[in-house]
Amino acid sequence: MADLSGRIVILGAGHAGGTAAALLRQLGWAGPITLVGDEPIAPYQRPPLSKAWLKGEADASSLALRPDSFYAEHHITVRLNARAAAIDRAASEVVLQGGERLGYDRLILATGARARRIALPGIELEGVLELRTAADADRLKAALGPGRRLAVVGGGYIGLEAAASARALGAEATVIELQSRVLARVACEPLSFFMQDYHRAQGVAIELGAGVDGLEGEGGRITGVRLSDGRVLPCDAALIGVGALANQELAQAAGLDCDGGVVVDLTAKTSDPAVYAIGDCTRRPLPLYGQMGRLESVPNALEQAKQAAADLCGTKPPLAETPWFWSDQYDLKLQIAGLPLGAQQILVRGEPATARFAVFHLDPDHRVQAVEAINAAPEFMAGRQLIGSRKPVAPDKLRDITVSMKDVAA
Amino acid sequence: MPKITYVEFSGTEHAIEVKTGLTVMEGAVKHNVPGIDADCGGACACATCHVYVDPAWTEKVGSPSAMEESMLDFAENVEPNSRLSCQIKVTDALDGLVVRMPESQH
């Protein structure tokens, strides 16, 4: 029987940290739980920040993971606007900035990731934005509106979602991508090509293979983005969305194993059994793919919160999950399951021109490694199951949209 | 506020007052009712907020959209009264609604 009376400190009050605190109470943890976050608000959902929140379709209470009263009701101490300066493992204490020490019996690191910053001339100009927090989203929202011009540096999910939201608000948007296609790091070619065309049809300008030399400004405010071919794209604001880095510095300084993320096992334990790490800040085993990786997604944050809470409370570990992601842009619902690692064959089911299709990544034994679905829920759901079950599929059937996904998966 | 009763697979009941305009899923998550995961936060993208609507309420709750239906098609242990609770908006007409949870959302 696990001892449920110890003190737990959770560093990071995002989706992972907030969920871990709630799950610990669900599973019967009786000891004190302290949730420490450096933002001024209690845990909230980040995915809507580039979507519904930006478009003004969600309010603060719908963004909140749980109502403010929840934490007091469940005896969870929430320390907002607080940031840890160090972890003193020898003393089992977290040192906050300002010097206060919080003792722990178990520590959970849920420090998340931060937007990668690039050293560009002009990066300090007003109107140069990133999108990670609610405060970031408020700044971006204030910069958008009819006739305003947004430049997006980086054609990843955040950038494309922001461009779609900007269009919905009547703003002009230009996406600038260094690679020869958008989503180059995270999606296959057919999906990238489809997304590029779709964004262009919605009035988004897309510059591919375009390097950025610097940001131009006047009176301390951004006026344009200077490309490496010499052109200057005028804008009123620029969103820099070029990936994220794990916030692993605290763990690293405390001597925990880190490797582009805090290294954890499938119980979310770090190299110190008294310290767990969950969410975007971790580098975790990916059992389906036989390797370690860092996943930046809400489903991953939730899965690891469950792993940690179950391990701490001595309850049944959660079932292994297939990694998955989603994105909403315009009237498109993107759902992606699995990672295309080890895939050799790409198979498209459906016609991209209909804006309803899916791309399957198969390994040499015709087992699904990943599926990328656009407005194609059955393909996504069946694909996700097939990835987990490792069952081979018949490519001819999979390609044939007259054969239902139920029959393909049967 | 409309009262909604969430019944865990184990039989444990949670009677909760949920603000109109929220979804049945949000009512559960915001009050820490176990058994509704809602991984995607209500985007109808994950089918981890699956519930069984009490037969007395199915008509009032209405039927799923095509999108929701195709998500449900591939969820575990689906019954004719299965719904994704993120797609059910709470209104005064749903005061007294009872939903039951499956054994697992995955």
Image (tube, grey):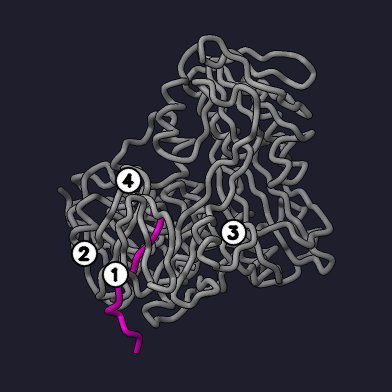
User: What's the mark number on residue A81?
Assistant: 4
Q: Does residue A139 show up? A: yes
Q: Which residues are magenta?
A: A1-12
Which label lies toward us, 2 or 4?
4
Q: Mark 2 near mark 4, Cβ–Cβ under 8 Å?
A: no
Q: Mark 2 near mark 3, Cβ–Cβ under 8 Å?
A: no
In the visual, does B41 lie left or right of A163? left
Task: Find numbered disc 3 in the image and state the secondary structure of the residue it sits on.
Answer: loop
What's the distance in space between the residues labelled 4 and 3, CA to CA?
A: 24 Å
The image quadrant where one finds the C terminus of chain A is bottom right
Residue type highlighted by circle 3: Gly
In the visual, does A168 lie left or right of A34? right
Residue A7 part of the magenta segment: yes
The residue carrying mark 1 is A25
Residue type highlighted by circle 1: Arg
Residue depicted at 25% across the width and 75% down the height: A30
Q: How far from the left and from the top, in percent, is residue A86? A: 43, 59
The residue carrying mark 2 is A75
Task: Find numbered disc 1 in the image and state the secondary structure of the residue it sits on.
Answer: helix
Q: How far from the left and from the top, in percent, is residue B47? A: 47, 58
In the visual, does B35 lie left or right of A165? left
Task: Find numbered disc 2 in the image and state the secondary structure of the residue it sits on.
Answer: loop
Q: Mark 1 near mark 4, Cβ–Cβ under 8 Å?
A: no
Chain of the residue where label 3 is placed in the rendered structure: A
Which label lies toward us, 1 or 4?
4
What's the distance in space between the residues labelled 1 and 2, CA to CA?
A: 9 Å
Residue type highlighted by circle 2: His
Residue depicted at 59% across the width and 67% down the height: A263
In the visual, does A43 lie left or right of A405? left
Between A355 and A327, the one lying in front of the other is A327
Chain of the residue where label 2 is placed in the rendered structure: A
The residue carrying mark 3 is A261
